[in-house]
Image (cartoon, helix red, strand yellow):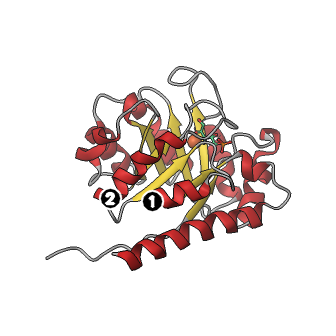
Amino acid sequence: MSSPRKSLSGKIGPSILNSDLSNLASECQRMLDSGADYLHLDVMDGHFVPNLTFGHPIVKCLRPKMPNAMFEMHMMVEPAERWIEDMAASGANMYTFHYEATQDVPGCVRKIKEAGMKAGISIKPGTKVEVLDPFIDLVDTVLIMTVEPGFGGQKFMADMMPKIEYLREHFSDLDIGVDGGVSLDTIQMCANAGANMIVSGSALMKSDNPREVMQTLRNTVEDSIQKSQLER
Ligand SMILES: O=C(CO)[C@@H](O)[C@H](O)COP(=O)(O)O
Ligand SMILES: [Fe+2]
């Protein structure tokens, strides 16, 4: 018996990397109040990427202030497995690790699930998308990087769109995320390619009206999903 079809929806996850980190909780709350579906929290270890951000102690402090928020942890750390238990204990909902940062993808996913979180897998711009084929059934989402991980505010790499197109063509129900330089100028490309989980940092943080930007990003994705479903 085939499993029931999952219906895709457009979701917006603000990245708070380029926000005022001295006011992290209020910046997160501002994004939630503006209609964010989840928060994309970028964890960098100064080793896998050439930058440092924050770790599970911060997540633990944020959690009680926003008990119902969905925290997706973008773990730019090596080894990828290192912080699974601590992040789960601190209140993270999803642990998105990098393919390039582990020797054992299935083992890493198993530990994430055993810790009670959803699992996401991400690839850097230089990694071929086909390497993910054996692992798609194991994970909840795939996150395609459209900048070199490490910094917010970089230029969107349009040449990553074929990776998203490949995934959407082969895995029609998969939640596909895109991260890096996503803005009102680049969302149409992401939506056309088939991304449905939209991470956006600077474009939201710099906007005077993040609610309107989120709504436009979401509508663009939803329109594209509807169109592709009509074409099926
Ligand atoms: O993971 C990363 C960068 O490594 C991202 O989440 C970005 O920080 C998103 O910010 P913008 O590129 O949208 O400014
Ligand atoms: Fe990120």
| Marks 1,2: beta carbons within 8 A | yes
Residue type marked 2: Glu
Counting other residues with Cα less than 10 Å from the Cα at mark 2, is it few (<14), some (14-19), or many (20 or more)?
A: few
56 up-or-down from 210: above or below = above
Query: What is the distance, in whole Å, between disc 1 and disc 2 at their CAs?
Result: 9 Å
**Where residue 160 appears, x then y in whole percent?**
47, 42
| Residue where numbered disc 2 is placed | 169
Q: Position of residue 68 (x, y in %)?
A: 61, 65
Name the residue rendered at 81%, 54% in the picture.
207
Q: Residues within 10 Å of mark 1 (few under 14, many from 20)?
A: many
SS of the residue under disc 2: helix
Q: Report the quarter where the C terminus lies.
A: bottom left
Q: How many marks?
A: 2
Ligand 1 rendered quadrant: top right
**If you read the primary sequence from the N terminus, does the residue marked by circle 1 or circle 2 appear first?**
2
Residue 9 position in % (x across, y down): 49, 70
- Can residue 40 be seen here? The reply is yes
Tag 1 secondary structure: loop
> Front-most of 143 and 74?
143
Left or right position of 185 against 163: right
35 relative to 5 in the view: left or right: right
Residue sitting at x 50%, y 24%: 48
Front residue of this view, candidates 214 and 70: 214
Q: Amino acid at mark 1?
A: Gly
x and y percent of residue 38 in the render?
A: 60, 59
Quick one: which residue is furthest to the left in this view? 1
Number of the label disc, if any, that sits on residue 124:
none
Q: Quadrant of residue 223?
A: bottom right
Q: Which residue is mark 1?
A: 194
